[in-house]
Image (spheres, coloured by chain):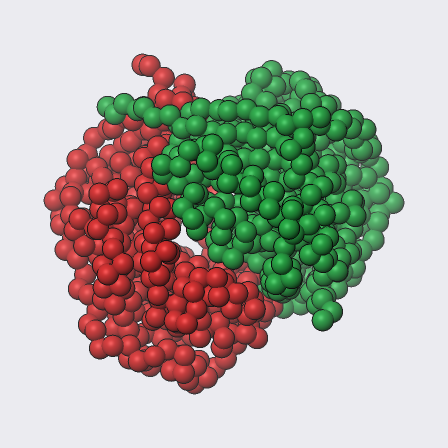
Amino acid sequence: MAEEYPPLRIEYLEPVDGLRLVRQSPPRSAASFAATYVGPAGWAYDPRGAEGMSRLVSQLVTSAAGPYGRVELARRLDRAGGVLSHQCAPESAEVTVWGPADAWQELLRLLALVVQRPRFDPEDVRRAHRQLLERQLRETTQPASRADREMLHRIFARGHPYRESGLGSPRSARRLTRTALRRFHAEHFTGEGGLLVLTAPADASTVRAAVRRHFEPFPSTRAPSAPDVPSAPGAPGRQTIDLPGRSQVEVRLGGRSVARSDPRYPAAFLANELLGGRPLLSRLFQRVRERGGLAYHASSDLEAMRWGGYWVAQAGTGADRWRKVLPMLERELAAVRHVAPAAAELELVRESAIGEIVLSLESTGEAHELAVDAAYHDLPEDHWVRWPERLREVRPNDVRDAARAAFSERGAVSVVAGPLAPE
Amino acid sequence: MAPPRVPRPRTRSFTLGNGLRVLLAPDPHSPTASVWVWYRVGSVNEHPGITGASHWVEHMLFEGSPRYPKGAMDRAVVRVGGQLNAFTDTDFTAYFSTVPREHLDVPLDIEADRMTRALITDPEVGRERTVIFSEREGNENWPEFRVEEELYQLAFREHPYRWDALGRREDIERMSAAELREYYHRFYGTRNAILVVAGGFAPAEVARQVRRRFGRLPRGGEDVTVARVEPEPRGERRAELTGPGTTPYVQVGFRAPALDDPMTPTGIVLDTILGGETRLFTSGSGWGRSGEHPSSRLYRGLVDPGLAVRASCDWRPRRYPALFTVQAQAAAGVSLDRLEAALLGLLERLAADGPSVAEVKECRTKLRRAVALAYEGASRTGFRLGYFSVLRAPELEDEIYRALFRVRPKDVRACARALFRPERRVVVRYRPTGGESVG
């Protein structure tokens, strides 16, 4: 598979100033380039009382940098044909540049500039503040984001890095001053603890030389140490939130799960695919939508991260139907935990997941995501080449056993948010 | 400087005896193959009583055909690692599957089977009714959806652009399986369909397969031309909605020309100058836009000074005259009146003074950038070829694209003057309310 599809294999290069460097070949039919910097700058690192910091910093680094204000930076990107994007998660923040392969050196230069020399211009900071406040409001008033937020609050105890959504509150937003933002950036957009993944039409030595040329030496700042991960339980049980005036009720069931490094992960991955992760084939989709006709979406996610994880089974349904949907989700969860799947069902889901890897090689952007994922979790260079083999080693009983751990009943919570009809 | 060519792949096209138009875009290096069927049928072909029929038929085409009973087509595609889905618009409906290239025969067989022989049974229609409701309810959770639905209802009194592709609640409630079958057999057929195959395959072999699978289908599909014409508006129309939300939101729509109108390329430049990007030529990965555009007029005029947290415009030229919309979400503490006044003032200034030479130049740079990677990957290729074909032909893209580079600042000013007239304006405002209870 690696010979046929070179992008499946990544290559770890010698670090530059402590920055881990990873190269991937672009798909043969692709004409674009992508590079992502990942820093230990997720919202788990937000200073206490200054929640919202990491999200604001990752938004602002892509705004203006070095000699370029935000308008000029946008124009430079336009000329190079590139797009800058940012993403923030509990553990890390990512900045990605994507554009034509023949402009990859210029795009890498712009990425280096935003990662290392963001300006945090006062008017940009004020604008980002205003946007953050509106997002905070949206999070509490929109049924889907409200259900997600309350679910995490109940799964994880106070102080747990996965407990928050990173948006903070109006009060914490007041502490996100320009000085504080700059300090957070200096401490978290580091070489040490950082990662740079390039999907580029160039060999290892050319890539390394380009990184050296475009990135200034990172200061010898040590990577921030990972936050404590308290094991104290959250507040299991059920919560209902009536949001009158909305149309759809969002239902969530969730709990703690395994880390990506857990040896049971391949079996847990398949358990999730079977439960609700695989579009169209999954049990939740089949039971709730196809046979029940009760919801437009019904699915599950397994968020297996570095420090642990969580699972969620979810559906969006009508005010008159959520009381039927919730027990359906519970029954399917119980089944996946307690009964090994039939060999044929497992085979179908597994071969679907394996076949789909090739679809990620349609474009540079999609292939690049595979590389970032493997590199972030420090997986072997041939991880995606060997992934089908690892999945094929999983037996039906392994899926059941992994589901017990990965979809643990202990501390499980349920949250329903939306226009709740009276009982 | 001459505009660059749109990097469209070499395409082989032919029409079968039954009227089915076929486009093949082979890429020997592609590991995937993507099959798209575009029907020139959308919500514009519906009428009150059966609004939402095109979208409902879209759902039903996954629910069984003679060779693929319920669930079988999903399993057939997904088991080989493929993905399949569909979407419904006002002017068309598109069905697509992307699979590892060695499995191209799977989606071809499915599309041939369901093009004219989807089952659409009474029990399945009944069961799908709540799914459709649920999809609509999910959209209704967003004030932006409610506002836009209201905007089109106000703007159109005669023309079927009046309703959203999801259909009206009361029609979803009462529409029967027989009505859906009648609608399907009337419009879905070879004459109203375009088959696009893109990606890794040998064109001669696939052309043979297409002839074998689709050539025997009966010629069908009634004329989808819509004769109803919306009268010219004679004054501003407006409405105000209330409901849960964050901050005030306003959307303004202006009657805009159809795709074939000579003003279309200028309108696209206007859209780019105002919002920073235009839907037909976006640098994002699909149809959506790729983020914030700090150099755009709306951003500088509304977001920078702290009046709005978001502001955008949208114009996707359609087969019939539709709306050019401009919308903004207020920053906390900014009233609807202030936001609307600022938004309309900004449009008036653009209509009075036109854009600068630098703005038009910058727009050209954006447009050059946007097409450079537009055809990366079999799925995007299938989408793009099909989209322009269902509206007219793949060459339509070149035609519009070339014309964009002839647009001058004074043309944009004239276009803005013609479009942004108060009597052609529809305004819908959304005033958020609070209230919740936690148990």
Q: Position of residue A104 (x, y in %)?
A: 51, 74
- Left or right relative to A56: residue B131: right
Q: Position of residue B229 (x, y in %)?
A: 78, 28
Query: Within the image, what quadrant is residue B178 found in?
Result: top right
- Left or right relative to B4: residue A360: left
Q: Locate the C terminus of chain A by quadrant.
A: top left
Residue depicted at 15% across the width and 43% down the height:
A158
Residue depicted at 33% across the width and 29% down the height:
A417
Residue depicted at 78% across the width and 51% down the height:
B393
Chain B shade in the render: green
Which one is nearer the viewer's eye here, A189 or B237?
B237
Q: Is residue A362 above or below residue B108?
A: below
Which one is nearer the viewer's eye here, B274 or B354?
B354
Query: Within the image, what quadrant is residue A389 found in?
Result: bottom left
Chain A shade in the render: red
Which one is nearer the viewer's eye here, A402 or B360?
B360
Which one is nearer the viewer's eye here, B68 or B335?
B335
User: How many numbered badges does the structure rendering display?
Assistant: 0
